[in-house]
Image (spheres, rainbow, N blue to C red):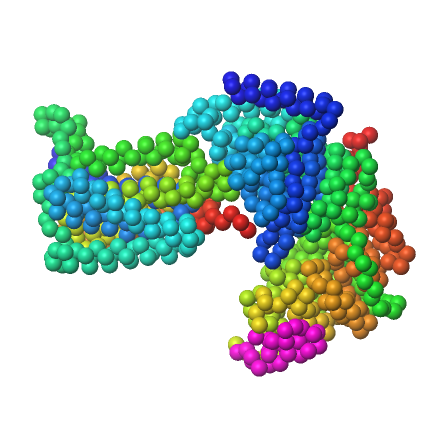
Amino acid sequence: MELFDSLILLLDSTVRLTVPLLLACLAGLYSERAGIFDIGLEGKMLAGAFGAAVVAALTGSAWLGLFAGIGVSVAMALVHGVASITFRGNQIISGVAINFLAAGLTTLLGQTWFRQGGRTPQLNGDARFNGFDFPFADQLAEVPVVGSIYSELLSGHNVLVYAAFFAVPITYFVLFRTRFGLRLRASGENPKAVDTAGVNVNMMRFKAVLITGILCGIAGAYLSTGMSSGFVKDMTAGRGFIALAALIFAKWMPVPALYACLLFGFLSALGNFMQGAELPIIGEVPVQLVQALPYILTVVLLAGFIGKAVGPKAGGIPYVKER
Amino acid sequence: MTDKSQANEQRSSGTAVSQNAAPQLAIELAGINKHFGPVHANKDIDLKVTRGTVHGIVGENGAGKTTLMSILYGFYTAETGRIFVDGKEVTIKDSSHALELGIGMVHQHFMLVDNFTVLENVILGAEDDALLQPSLDKARKVLAQLARDYELEVDPDALIEDLSVGGQQRVEILKALYRGAEILILDEPTGVLTPSEADHLFKVLETLRKQGKTILLITHKLREIMAITDDVSVMRQGAMVKTLETKNTDPAELAELMVGRRVLLRVDKGPSNPGDVKLEVRDLVVKDDMDITRVKGINFEVRAGEIVGIAGVSGNGQSDMLEAITGMRKADSGQLIVKGKEVVIKGDDGAAKLRDMSVAHVPEDRQELGLVVTFEQWENAILGYQDDDKYGKGAFLSIPAAREEANRHIEKYDIRPANNRLKAANFSGGNQQKIVLAREMSRNPDVLVVGQPTRGVDIGAIEFIHNQIVAMRDAGKAVLLVSVELDEIRSLADRILVMFDGHIVGEADPATATEAELGLLMAGVSADNAPESDKREANNKESAK
């Protein structure tokens, strides 16, 4: 039974660690499906985390923090949009610039404003997104297996966690069941077909980039006001890139994206869980090795195990109408 | 429901018009102008298209047909000119506006999303609701109806990438009809089709015309014009040359109008003095990037001291043949023999290999293939020969040596301005061509292959270039000249070979052959002369019987 409890704890941790990956991955999904590569997920998430933490600290409201995080992230997404859609710049360079900008600005502003080495003040109470329990969670906790799954694994998370998982079916529906989704996907595959059908390609791409900004903002807010209690320098720690890897791994599909993010989330959780643990035969597992696992897996999977991952055909290419 | 009744209404009104004694104009264009940078793609174009007819627009590649149609479809905007649709003046802002006016276009390169289904492609941009399902259901019904009416059968749930080219084209037509197009523009529709698919397409077009639709057919294939159109307009070099009733014209006249009769430039040249065979082509078959066979087994030889001219309307396989002969493209089968030795091209170094065998190449498109236009003239002067020891040994380039070479070119070939530091892009067309010619000719090659030597070149430069080519011949070189300018071929060549649809359909003596004879050959009319029977023509003949 102890093993089972450990497993529940591990999975619970997986859920929490999956959320930022999943939100960022879906963010990238919208943008790349519309034909705009976005390597700046990391930067937008980081800026969003900072914005959310600052406003939450100043106002004491996690919700205002969330909106601030979204606002900051959307602003950066629009910079990427203007650079790569309006001015037809290189999407990779624009994305890299966003990452640098976010990393530099958050540290600089954090230090200037709060003088805590780039940290923002500790958030408490309503300034954080706190978990809430499902009905009867306490009572059912005693029921074997089902009870602990219900009260530990499913219940007790904050609202952003549920929102993130709920975003998966919504994304699927939007992309594959709506006019907006059809046009968005077509913009990433053959923008000329969209144009000749009388739809404004660049406007479609801007809308996609906007959604990317919103989702990255939520991911960032979750990091600083949900998972942690404040912003720490470079707190995204490469999650934006892992999310991109998950996106490719999932072949730009929403439901596989969920599985890919769960896998990477599980590996992160496992990394934390194994710290100092003794395994038979091997002995103590080096923490660094376990923490490196998600990255190693990414390389191995992308290098060959998932087969050919063909992204949207027009991805990365600015749309030019006149020849 | 509303859609069906609308379609019926449109159909009945269409029939009413076609029965009307005084035919109405579906489209009128007046004074259309469009530039792309320095290229004047459409010059003062006037065009009148009668409703309920099939109106052909012919012209060579680059004559401005596609540009004109793209203006009509709202994809480009004209700089000047007026457009009337159904007698009303309109300003077509974009494609969706053109669609509202009932103009649909089937593009040469299909505007389809490969990994979408047929239904998704059909409704893209014409969805009724925010949710797709109702539109998909409606499109399924409409498509079934259209399939019955016009023999346009396509599996609505198939992915585009799984359809044949003909099937994809049917989807494009369905897309336009689904949007209620009354005027349908087809841009080179048969270029990618198999003969039976093309026959099917013509049947569909016939039905569409009977239902009162107006069809604009852009093509450079005269046979198609003769077979299906009511009227035909000829375009040449961006200008509208003439509009004729199809029944009052013939392919020879059209070919002449397309190619154009220019003032025959006299070239002083004595009789040729052919020597050994320097270049020989046996059963050459070449496919293009889209895997379409463009050269269908041709044979010829070029001797030292003669100019062999390949005539033909552009797009009949000349470019692909040139690419194969100069090593830029791997031939599908057949032999290329240079100075008695067979050349086998394996990798990407074919062009260099032939250069090493003293085959010089002046490519058709100087800006794309002949020059690096952002490089200075001295750099272009040694391009392709930059590894020669003349210009420095090992990894280093001797810039003084290269500049000297460049100055020799400037002097001998009268390249203006005489400045080797000027970028190639800043020279005029004629001088750009001279830069290429100078580079290739000054190597003293045994074989010179020249494509469209005077395209877009002013009269003065034309004369100079022609004289240089004759001088090469008189120096005992074998010269292969490919040109769509019939006059150029007639005044330069010692023997003329005519290419049509990937075959050499005839040989003529420039001294005796008349323009009319050559025009007929270029139009593929006297197929009797064809060395191999063209399957497609044979099929057509059979079906005609």
Q: Residue at x 67, y 62 (%)?
A: B363
Give coordinates of residue B414: x percent, y percent: 70, 74
Extent of the magenta region: B396-421
Q: Is residue B36 left or right of residue B293?
A: left
Q: Is residue A320 left or right of residue A267?
A: right
Q: Would you identify the image quadrant in which residue B488 lies?
A: bottom right
- The picture places residue B341, in percent across and down from the top left corner, at 74, 65
Q: Nearer the viewer, residue A110 or B160?
A: A110
Q: Depth check: give the residue in front, A287 or B288.
A: B288
B269 vs B141, left or right, is: right
Residue B418 falls inside the magenta stretch: yes
Q: Look at the image and tell me whether residue B534 can be seen.
A: yes
A168 horizontally vs B363: left or right? left
In the rendered image, the vertical position of residue B363 relative to residue B187, given as above or below: below
The percent position of residue A164, horizontal first and vertical second, equals 26, 37
Specify the quadrant of the image occupied by residue A175.
top left
User: Residue B148: x and y, percent?
Assistant: 62, 21
Q: Is residue B380 above or below residue B236?
A: below
- Quadrant holding the C terminus of chain B: top right
Q: Residue at x 70, y 74 (%)?
A: B413
Asked if the stretch drawn in magenta spans residue A186, the answer is no
Is residue B535 visible from the viewing direction of this image? Answer: no
User: On screen, B471 above or below A86?
Assistant: below
Query: Splitting the image into 4 quarters, where does residue B426 fall?
Result: bottom right
Residue occupying the point 69% across, 29% down = B24
Residue found 36% across the figure and 55% down from its top = A94
